[in-house]
Amino acid sequence: MAYVCAYQEGKLIGYVNAAWDGKTHAFILDTTVHPGHRHRGIGKELVLRAIEQAKMRGVAWVHVDYEPHLKGFYAQCGFRSSEAGVFSVAREA
């Protein structure tokens, strides 16, 4: 796992987690930039650095799940859409 963080004047303004299975697949999680620092390329740089950390550890594939409104952001980071399956284990109320 790698945590990549951005600081300004000693204060945390952004971070991203990269978790992997110990083999060839990594997952980008929790990409976050403080609202006052968004739209400056910080999030993209965090994601790219997390990908680089995964690559250095021998990862071949990096995955990310995101809400539809973030599709453009992750496309700018180099991600492309793919088919995937999901299974809900939550019980209906």
Image (tube, rainbow, N blue to C red):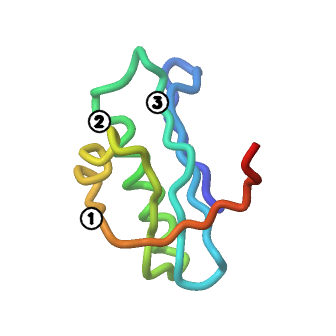
Give the residue type at disc 1: Arg
* Tag 2 near tag 1, CB within 8 Å: no
Numbered disc in front, either 1 or 3: 1
* Among the 4 quarters of the image, the one containing residue 43: top left
Residue denoted by label 2: 41
Residue at 50% in and 32% down: 14
- Which residue position holds label 3? 33
What's the distance in space between the residues labelled 1 and 3, CA to CA? 22 Å
Quadrant placement of the N terminus? bottom right
> Which circle's residue, 1 or 3, is located before the other in the chain?
3
In screen coordinates, is 85 left or right of 10?
A: left
Give the secondary structure at mark 1.
loop
Task: State the residue in front, 86 or 93.
Answer: 93
Mark number for residue 65?
none
- Circle 1 is placed at which residue position? 80
Horizontal side, residue 71 vs residue 93: left or right: left
Give SS at disc 3: strand
